[in-house]
Amino acid sequence: MNSSTQPSTLTLGLFEKRIDGDDCLMELARRRFLQADMGAEMHAGTPEQLVGLLKFRPGDAASVVVHLPRDFQLGDARSQERILEFAARFAGRIHGLVIHDHTDIAWRREDYFQAAREMESRLAHINRCPMLFVEYAVGLEPNTFAAFFDSIRELSRISACIDTGHVGIWQARAAYSGMHPGQDICELRSRDVLPPQVMADVEGAVSAAPKTILDLVASLGALGKPVHFHLHDAHPLSTFSPFGVSDHLSFLAEIPLRFEYRGLRSLPLMFGPVGLRRIVGKAIETIGRVSFTLEIHPIAERVSLSDEAALLFGHWRDKTNAEQMNHWLSVLTQNHALLLEAIKDVLSLSAPQIHEHDRV
């Protein structure tokens, strides 16, 4: 639990080794997260993998959420057993487990509903069971995603994970395809030049995304359950990601352009710091019990190691990857400071209402 925030508001960062190297990279991450008072969201496919990662937990009291692999599906019997194994083995030690949603929410609604009820009944037998969060990931219509959780509102151990980038890119794609049928806004990022009219439509499509997320937050907030968030910025023209996606960006970045548009060679992101504050404010106001993971991916930039950090990598001849890890950790901690500031602002403006909610 983070001492810098209310008990009902947890802040975490993506905590894993996405850069090649030995476990000194994880030790560097542990130190940076501990200094920032930031919890950790870890990816693990087996309990044994998680045991290894927890050795680098940034402090005994640090919040931990575990993101399970994409092939873990709520409606699959084998996946249910694997989820239950994690829940039972790490009960009382982690805040939650995250799995991806599935198109069955839309196309086999009754089957998915029954799978959720069965999972809830089995989780109920685990003392101090972590929450199971189902993440918006496969591109469902957001109202369909919200309607599923409305249908299981009585299930106290299963709730939603809102991924700001996934929802935002879905909305931008939907809005742009309404203006340009059959075209994908994300495919425009490969163009060296875009006509002004197309750029104006891109701006219009991107500007529609924040409201969609705020509406989804309001819908899920009405259910009275904890909600987990994957916070990251996005833009359909982004080429930052080494994984080829348009999101998982820092809230402090801008999109460079290879051409001039309205006298500028860059664009603001989908949310930015102001958008982040709006999402955080809406979440705390309507949900109360929230956890926020900054799910920002590394890029190829580097930051030199401090003397203390350099000692960790004395056996490395080439420090390039260590410096890339250091850059990533710097970005995460900068965004974490921004997140904490947003939470502080929200709590200072609505302290009586928040305190009343926490007593419920």
Image (cartoon, grey):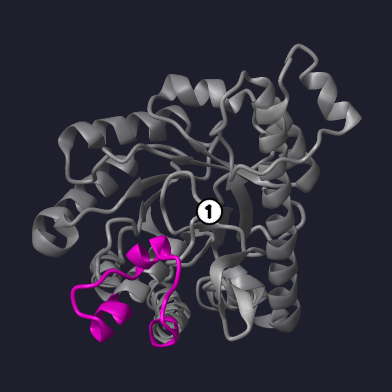
Q: Is residue 274 above or below residue 48?
A: below
Q: Judge whether residue 276 can be spotted in this image.
A: no
- Vertical placement of residue 317 versus 60, above or below: above
Q: Is residue 110 left or right of residue 156?
A: left
Residue 183 lies in magenta, yes or no? yes
Residue 156: name its quadrant.
Answer: bottom left
Amino acid type of the residue that numbered disc 1 sits on in the rendered structure: Phe
Query: Is 16 included in the stretch rendered in magenta?
Result: no
Q: Please state the horizontal and vertical placement of residue 334, each as a whole percent of the image.
A: 74, 55
Prevailing secondary structure class for the magenta stretch in the rendered image: helix
72 or 275: which is nearer to us? 275
Estimate the x, y position of residue 312 in percent, counting from the top left. 79, 20
Q: In which quarter of the view is residue 76 placed?
A: top left
Identify which residue is drawn at 42% across, 76% down: 194
Q: Which residue is mark 1?
A: 240
- Residue 17, percent from left and from top: 56, 31
Tell me how many marks there are.
1
Where are the magenta residues, as a range?
174-199
